[in-house]
Image (tube, rainbow, N blue to C red):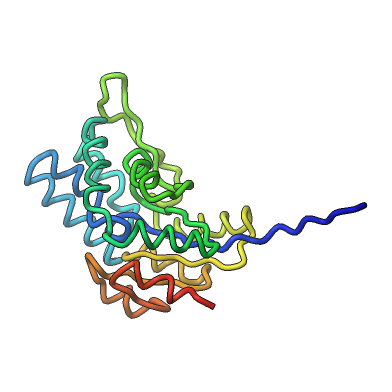
């Protein structure tokens, strides 16, 4: 007897992390640990990049060079991600998984900081930038080749995920201009505005929400 197994294609729900799954911007919190002057300088660059006023690649290396994040800072910000988690994220992701969606995190932030939050939320896969540290825990660089360190990186990675996973549907949720860049390669781009509503993202999104709890109803059908 011959049995034919049919593999059901996944439905991907891809989340930005900073100011979406959690209230904070990780890079800004790393800067805060270095004092108010560093924080103000880095926050201004982050805001300009998230609003699409300057390219991500124009500030990515510069912010890290200013901050020189330590391994201990990374651990502290990782805890803060969970403390400031979007209040409906845990229940919403569980509901989406039960409905057959596969959640992923796609971020211009840092893998080591995001991993504890992903584990907390039950998200198995993270696409984010790796930081490097020396034996003393001091900053030793980052993966400069990772796509989200530059403009256009998120759609590039989503296209690669689609080739790998052949999803039946792909949805992206995020708050920033780099997230909006993914709109042409997904079936639905959902702008997110709970923490930092951005006019450009709201105007360009297929849909715009202020709570992740709005997602399950939006994705029905």
Front-lying residue, 101 or 149: 101
Q: Residue at x 17, y 54 (%)?
A: 43
Q: Residue furthest left?
A: 36
Residue 208 x %, y %: 34, 76
Determine whether 105 is above or below 172 in the image: above
Residue 205 x %, y %: 39, 76
Picture quadrant of residue 64 = top left
Residue 41 x %, y %: 14, 50
Question: In the rendered picture of this protein, how many numbered marks are placed on residues?
Answer: 0
Determine whether 82 is above or below 177 in the image: above
Q: Residue at x 20, y 49 (%)?
A: 28
Q: Residue at x 44, y 63 (%)?
A: 95
Residue 46 x %, y %: 23, 56
Determine whether 86 is above or below 35 in the image: below
Determine whether 84 is above or below 214 in the image: above
- Asked if residue 98 lies left or right of residue 32, the reply is right
Q: Residue at x 7, y 46 (%)?
A: 37
State which quarter of the image contains the C terminus. bottom right
Q: Residue furthest top?
A: 135
- Asked if residue 162 lies left or right of residue 134, the reply is right
- Asked if residue 47 lies left or right of residue 128, the reply is left
Front-lying residue, 104 or 155: 104
Front-lying residue, 203 or 219: 219
Picture quadrant of residue 86 = bottom left
């Amino acid at each position: 007897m011959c049995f034919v197994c049919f593999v059901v294609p996944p439905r991907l729900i891809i989340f930005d992390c900073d100011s979406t799954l959690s209230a904070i911007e990780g890079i800004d919190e790393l800067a805060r640990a270095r004092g108010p002057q560093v924080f103000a300088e880095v926050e201004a660059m982050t805001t300009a990049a998230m609003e699409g006023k300057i390219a991500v690649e124009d500030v990515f290396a510069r912010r890290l060079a200013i901050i020189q994040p330590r391994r201990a800072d990374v651990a502290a910000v990782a805890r803060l991600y969970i403390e400031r988690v979007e209040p409906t994220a845990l229940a919403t992701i569980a509901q989406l998984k039960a409905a057959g969606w596969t959640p992923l995190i796609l971020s211009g932030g840092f893998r080591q900081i995001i991993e504890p939050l992903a584990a907390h939320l039950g998200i198995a896969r993270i696409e984010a930038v790796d930081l490097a540290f020396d034996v003393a825990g001091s900053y030793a660089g980052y993966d400069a080749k990772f796509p989200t360190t530059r403009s256009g990186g998120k759609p590039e990675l989503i296209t690669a995920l689609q080739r790998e996973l052949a999803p039946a549907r792909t949805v992206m949720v995020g708050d920033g201009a780099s997230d909006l860049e993914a709109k042409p390669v997904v079936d639905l781009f959902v702008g997110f505005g709970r923490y930092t509503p951005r006019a450009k993202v709201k105007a360009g999104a297929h849909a715009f929400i202020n709570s992740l709890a709005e997602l399950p109803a939006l994705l029905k059908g």
